[in-house]
Image: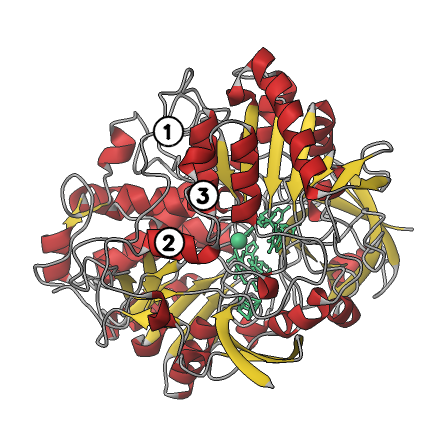
Amino acid sequence: MKKYINTLCFMCSVRCPIQVEVENEQVISIRGNPHVPAMNGGVCPKGVAAMAALNDTQRVQSPLIRTGERGSGQWKRVSWEEALDYTADRCKAIFDKYGAKSAVYCERANLISDISKSFQKAIGSPNHFTHDTVCKGSINTACRSMIGYTDGQINADWTNAKHVVLYGRNVFESVEIKAMNSFMAALEKGTKLTYIDPRVTITAAKAHDYKMIRPGGDLAFNYALMNIIIKEKLYDAPYVKRWVEGFNELSRFVDPYTPEWAEKETGLPAAEIVSLAREVSRVKPAVVFHYGYRGSHHPTEVYFRRSILILNALIGSIESKGGLFIKKGLKDAGYKAGLKTFSSQKFPEMEDKRRFDGCGQDKFPIADPAHGVGFMFPHAVINEDPYPIKVLFAFRYDPLLSNPDYNTNMKALQKLDLIVASDVNFGATTAMADVILPESFFLERSDPLQMGSGLKPAINRRIACVRPRFDTEPMWWIVKQLADRLGVGQYFPYETAEDIWKYQLADLDIKIEDFDETGSVSLSDKAIWWDRNDGINFKTPSGKIEVVSDLMESHGIPSLPAYEPLDRQPDAFRLMCGRCVAHTNVMTQNNLYLNHLVPENRLWINDRRAKELGIADNDRIEVASNAGKGEMRAFVTDLIHPEAAFMLHGFGHKEVDSKRSYGKGVADAMLQERHHDKIGGSPALDHTWITVKKL
Ligand SMILES: Nc1nc2c(c(=O)[nH]1)N[C@H]1C(S)=C(S)[C@@H](COP(=O)(O)OP(=O)(O)OC[C@H]3O[C@@H](n4cnc5c(=O)[nH]c(N)nc54)[C@H](O)[C@@H]3O)O[C@H]1N2
Ligand SMILES: Nc1nc2c(c(=O)[nH]1)N[C@H]1C(S)=C(S)[C@@H](COP(=O)(O)OP(=O)(O)OC[C@H]3O[C@@H](n4cnc5c(=O)[nH]c(N)nc54)[C@H](O)[C@@H]3O)O[C@H]1N2
Ligand code: SF4
Ligand SMILES: [Mo]
C-alpha cells in the first residue's frame, strides 16, 4: 500500500519539509511537503537524488575498523558491539593519559547537535565545533556585535521586499527552496534585484542590475553607499534616531569614502553607487541588503558583514516588512517554555575549560563558542596548542575538505591517535578514519524535533520513511552507546526517537500525534512582527543596533577601523569558490544522479587573460598556489572578472571507495592557503592567489 510521509530533507543543511511517497519499502517519489505553501510542491535536484543515495551500494554499509594504512580503503567489517567497544576502549586509554579534553567533536550542525554537545560535556571536553564556523562564523560574529542575535536568528522577508541587494548570494543556484520560491514570486510582482559578484551566476542573469565588482571590492562599495546615504540624508531618520547607536561616529567615519574613492577598489563607476543609494532609499524600509553566506571571504570579513547590516540599519529595514526580521520562537508565540534540551542538564565540572580554538577565550574572544572556530583545528593538533589533541569525532562533517589547505589538514589528521567518523558515505575524512560508525540515511531514521523559528514559528519532525537498507543506526543511538561505554550514559535518558520527542515536549502542551498529519505543529497562524517604532527587542547592551559595538570595543576590537585595501597580484588570479545547483558542498559528488549531472569542476577564467596565457576552453591546465596544486580543465569565458578565477567547491575526491567521484576535478581546499578572519573566525576562502598554466 502507498504511504505519503511528511519529513525533513537532509541532502543539504537547509532541511526543507518534504513529502516522501513509499510503497513496499521503496521510495517512489520525493516532493515538497504540500502543507508548506512556500515549497510549491518542489525540491531541488539534490533532494530528488536522495533516492539514489538511499540505495547506493557505495555507501558505508556496516561498522568498519581500519586494517590497512589510513586512507587505503582496507577495512574489517565488524558488529556494532565490536566497533563501539573498540572505540570506547581506545578513548579510555587516551583519556587516561591526556584527559578527555584531548577529544574534539565536530559536526555539521543538525538536529542532534544538542545531544552531541551533551556528549562532550558528559565526558568532560570543552572541544566541540560545528560546520557553521567554516561557513558563516564571521557573519554570526557581525550579527551578534550589532543586534545581539546570531545570523541563524534573523532572516529576510523575501516576499514583501521591494529591492534586494545580493553580494554573491547566489540564491538561484545555492538554493534554499522556500526562500527561492518566495523571492521568485516577488520578482514576478516587481521586486528589484541588484546582484554583485565578480562572476555572472544564474542569479546575476535574473537581476535588474548586475555589477561585476573586483574580487573583494564589496567593503569599499558599501562604505561609499553609506557615504551617499548619509550625505544626501537618504536614511530613515526616525528609525536611526530611535534604534542606531553610533550614527555620529559612522558619519565621520564614512566621510572620506566617497563613490569616486570606491571606483578604484571596486572597478565600478561612482555614478552607479550613487544611483543605487538613491534607488533603495525611495522604497525604504522594504529593502534587503542580504548578509549572505559565502562569497568575499577575506581576513576583513567581519567588517564586510557588519557593513551590510549597517546599510539595513540606515535604511530602517531591520524588523520591517520587506526587510530583515528577527525570527520568533515559542515564547513569542505565547508559550511559557521551549523545547527541553539535553545539554541544559547539570554536568560535572570540567577539569580544564580551555578550548582547542580559544573561542570565546584568548584567541577569538568574540566568536561564538556555540559553534567554535573550526579553522583552528589543524593548528591545535599540529602545534599541540594549547595541549595535545589526540581524538577526533568527525560526525556528519568533513574537516579534510571543508577547511582551507588540504595538505596541512592531512598532516593534522595523520598526527591523531584516533579518528572516529560517522557518515553515510565514504567522505574524505571518513576514508581516513580508524573506525566508522555509519549512520542510517535520513530517509531511514527519525531525529530529534526541530524548532523552526520564523515569522510564523513551528516545530518540525523528521521521521523514518523506510527501514535501513544496511547495518546502520541513527546518530543519537550511536552517541548514547558510546556514552554508556564511557560511563556517562545517564545523560542520555532515551531508548527510541519517541522517547526523545517526549523529552523535548515535556514542558509543552503538544503531543507527538500532533505531527502526524502535516509533519509539523504550527505555533502561530499569523506572522509575528515587533513594533518597529518602539518594540524591537535587540539583545545588545544598549538595546539598540550597535554600529559602535560594546561587544567589540569591550574586547579592544575597533568597530570602525580605517579601510585597508586588499593586496593585488596582477599576474595571478584571485581564487573564488562556490556551489552549483546539482551538488551539496563535499557530500554528493559520488551520488549516482548528481555525478551524472556535474561530474567534475573546471576553472572559470576570463577569456582575455586566458588568451594571454595561450589557454583555450576545455584545455587541461595546472593551477597552483602557495598551498598546493592540481590539474583540471579550463572554462574560458567573459562571464568572470579578469582578476578572478572560480571553481566549484566539493571536487577532487580521493576516497577509493567512492568510485564515481574518485580523482575527478580539483579540491579548492588543495589550493586555498590558511588565511582567516582573526575576529570573526571564518576561513578567508576567497583570499588566495593562484597561477594557471596550460599543460
Ligand atoms: N545547490 C546547493 N545549494 C546550497 C548549498 C550547496 O552546497 N548546493 N549549500 C548551502 C550552504 S551550506 C551555503 S553556505 C549556501 C551558500 O550560498 P551562497 O553564498 O549564495 O553560495 P556560493 O555558491 O558559495 O556563492 C558564492 C558566490 O560569491 C561569489 N564571490 C566570490 N568572491 C566575491 C566577492 O569578492 N564579492 C562578491 N560580491 N561575490 C564574490 C562567487 O563568485 C560565488 O558566486 O548555499 C546553501 N545552498
Ligand atoms: N574549501 C572550502 N571549504 C569550505 C567551503 C568552501 O566553499 N570551500 N564551504 C564551507 C561551507 S559554506 C560549509 S556549510 C561547510 C560544509 O562542510 P561539511 O559539513 O563538511 O560538508 P557537507 O558536504 O555538508 O557534509 C559533510 C559530511 O557529512 C556527511 N553526511 C551527509 N549526510 C549525513 C547524514 O545524514 N549522517 C551522517 N552521519 N553524515 C552525513 C557527508 O557524507 C560528508 O562526508 O564547508 C565549508 N568549508
Ligand atoms: S535545498 Fe534541496 S537538498 Fe537542501 S534540504 Fe532543500 S530539497 Fe533538500
Ligand atoms: Mo554553508
Determine whether, in the image, residue 21 is placed left or right of residue 235: right
Mark earlier in primary sequence (3, 1):
3
Residue at 25% x, 75% y is: 283
Quarter location, residue 606: bottom right
Look at the numbered disc 2 and give the secondary structure of its residue.
helix
Q: Residue at x 74, y 67 (%)?
A: 55
Amino acid bearing label 3: Ile
From this viewpoint, is residue 372 visible?
no
* Residue in the foreground of this view, choosing between 323 and 16: 16
Residue denoted by label 2: 152
Q: What number is the disc on residue 115?
A: 3
Which residue does the image show at 18% across and 67% down from the upper left?
A: 529
Amino acid carrying mark 2 in the image: Gly
Given the image, on which type of amino acid does mark 1 rest?
A: Gly
Tag 2 near tag 1, CB within 8 Å: no
At label 3, counting other C-alpha atoms closer than 10 Å, the crowd grade (few under 14, some 14-19, many 20 or more) is many
